[in-house]
Image (cartoon, grey):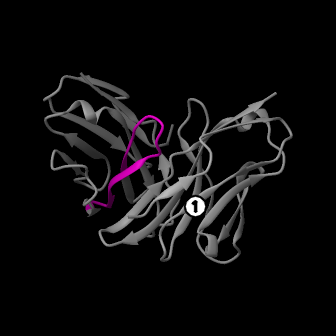
Amino acid sequence: DTGVSQDPRHKITKRGQNVTFRCDPISEHNRLYWYRQTLGQGPEFLTYFQNEAQLEKSRLLSDRFSAERPKGSFSTLEIQRTEQGDSAMYLCASSLGGTSGSEQYFGPGTRLTVT
Amino acid sequence: AQSVSQHNHHVILSEAASLELGCNYSYGGTVNLFWYVQYPGQHLQLLLKYFSGDPLVKGIKGFEAEFIKSKFSFNLRKPSVQWSDTAEYFCAVTAVDNYGQNFVFGPGTRLSVLP
């Protein structure tokens, strides 16, 4: 399968713990996006990268959220000191090209449950 | 802030019925518009997109959408639905606002097609 992959698919953690999710984009795609999706809502944009540069991070939900894409390939999203409100599906997408109109290819998501 | 609204939360149709799903957005500047679909158990995938030019755009599987700038609308249509069109449909807008690049999804419309 050469699509976008995410790991883990499910994560259950206790409140206050840190979690890290990984996203592997389609190999030739230079842009990578992170979204959060809660039940009954559409994806909520968090941040995106062009190669290794994080071009937009003002929409990260709080300073507990951070993302990296150190070599312009895979990316990680970390949530520190998790809260129950962080429970959601975290989606990653990638695209080829330098415009906001490029088609985004989505991964299966990581479902986070904070107990 | 930019927002995307979708008129219906859940639409139920019989096979061969015509479909129109409404989408309105709030941003007044230049936008790119998208419809994404999520079939049961699958990833989000692109149905169609509008950048510029002909406001009537055609997508995969017989879907089309019309951009009406004066109404800030981008409604999705299909003349005759099939059972396999059962899915969740998301309208999305990309634009630049005061904070930078943004990708805004609507809350989604669930379509159930009865055989």
State the residue in front, B92 or A104.
Answer: B92
**For the stretch drawn in magenta, what is the main secondary structure?**
strand
For the point 51% across and 66% down, which residue is it? A101
Q: Position of residue B6 (x, y in %)?
A: 58, 51
In the image, taking residue A58 as reference, residue A50 lies left or right, namely right
- Residue B66 in which image quadrant: bottom right
Image vertical order of residue A47 relative to residue B67, above or below: above
Name the amino acid, label 1.
Asn
Q: Residue furthest right?
A: B16
In depth, the one of B1 and A9 nearer the eye is B1
Is A45 colored magenta in this rendering? yes
Tell me the crowding category of disc 1: few under 14, some 14 to 19, or many 20 or more residues within 10 angstroms, Cα based. Answer: many
The reply to whether residue A97 is in sight is: no
Q: Which residues are magenta?
A: A34-53
**Image location of residue A79, percent across then percent down:** 20, 39
Residue named by callout 1: B24
Picture coordinates of residue A43, whole percent (x, y): 44, 46
Q: Quadrant of residue A12?
A: top left
**Image coordinates for residue A31, horizontal then vertical, percent:** 39, 59
What residue lies at 15% left-to-right and 38% top-to-bottom? A80
Specify the subunit that label 1 lies on: B
Label 1: state its secondary structure: strand
Task: Tell me: A65 left or right of B94.
Answer: left
Quadrant of res B38: top right
Looking at the figure, which quarter contains the N terminus of chain B?
A: bottom left
Q: Is residue A65 visible?
A: yes
User: In which quadrant of the rendered image does the C terminus of chain B lie?
Assistant: top right
Q: Residue at x 48, y 37 (%)?
A: A40
The image shows residue B67, relative to residue A5, as above or below, that is below
Q: In this rendering, would B5 be left or right of B21?
A: left
Q: How many marks?
A: 1
